[in-house]
Structure formats: C-alpha cells, structure tokens
Amino acid sequence: MTSKPRITIRYCTQCNWLLRSAWMAQELLSTFGADLGEVALVPGTGGIFKIQVDGESIWERKRDGGFPEAKVLKQRVRDIVWPERDLGHSDKHHRAPASDEHSEELKGGAETTPASEELKGGPFNE
C-alpha cells in the first residue's frame, strides 16, 4: 500500500495569513477528500507562504508572485499526485471559438449594444 500525499502550507503569522491558509486547506480537502493523507498548516514568520506536496514545492509567494487561485493550486496538486485526474468544472479551459457556421449566424444576427450604452440612464447613473 502506498502512502497518501501530505500537503503542508507554511504561512506567516505576522502577516495574519492563517485564514487564507485554512481556506486553501479547505479547498484542497473538499476537492481531494480522503485521497489526501494530510493537509498541515505550519506557522512561520518573515512573510513565508509556501505550499508543498510530499516535500516538493508547488507554490511560493515570493517566487510565484503572490497567492495562488484555488483553481491553480488544485491543478498543481493534481499534476504531481494524480496527473490523469479530471477536476471537473474548475479544470475546464476557455470555450473553443465558435465554428464557422455559428460565426456566420452571429455576424448576421441582431446588433449588439456595448455594455456602457446599456447602463446609461440606469438607477445609478442619474
């Protein structure tokens, strides 16, 4: 039997990143559930925010430029531990461009109005 993956989230207590870390842990546990062996929150100082899977760094705030979006974090965990796993709706790429047939229908369809024009005269634009 192989052991289940262990995720550690090291966060800066001086920066008050406990809630952010706990939320990310919750997102991972909600997505991967019992497939994970552990998600550990490890307090630190000095602006640290680092996420590791079995000791392999998948996110560092200073290196990667801020904090990960939940979608990106889940994809990075998945890519290391279960590369073939589908993450459902959060893993979908942008919709493919419309086919030529549908593009022609759209070109000949009703005129569209820019959103800024639609908002003129609304309750907040008096």
Image (cartoon, helix red, strand yellow):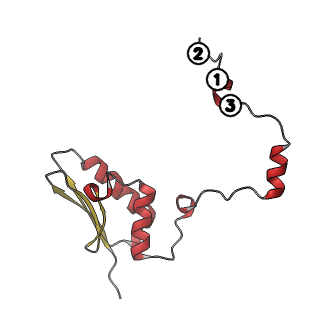
Say which quarter of the image contains residue 107. Answer: top right
Q: How far apart are marks 3 and 1 (CA)?
A: 9 Å
Outermost residue to the top:
126
Of tags 2 and 3, the one toward the viewer is 3
Q: Residue 114 carries which label?
A: 3
Q: What residue type is labelled 2?
A: Asn
Q: Distance between the residues labelled 2 and 1?
A: 8 Å
Q: Which amino acid does label 3 sit on?
A: Pro
Q: Do the residues labelled 2 and 1 touch (CB within 8 Å)?
A: yes
From the viewer's perspective, tell me whether residue 3 is left or right of residue 106: left
Q: Where is residue 86 in the image (x, y as percent from the top left)?
A: 54, 70
Q: Which residue is drawn at 45% across and 76% down?
A: 82
Q: Which mark is residue 119?
A: 1
Task: Identify the mark nearer the N-term, 3 or 1.
Answer: 3
Q: Total of numbered circles in the picture? A: 3
The residue that label 2 is drawn on is 125
Of tags 3 and 1, the one toward the viewer is 3
- Quadrant of the snapshot with the N terminus: bottom left
Q: Nearer the viewer, residue 104 or 74?
A: 104
Specify few, some or many for label 3: CA neighbours under 10 Å numbering under 14, 14-19, or 20 or more. few
From the viewer's perspective, tell me whether residue 32 is left or right of residue 67: right
From the viewer's perspective, tell me whether residue 92 is left or right of residue 4: right
Q: What residue type is labelled 1?
A: Leu
* Residue 63 against residue 17 in the figure, above or below: below
Q: Which residue is drawn at 29% across and 53% down?
A: 21
Secondary structure of the residue carrying numbered label 1: helix
Q: How far apart are marks 2 and 3 (CA)?
A: 16 Å
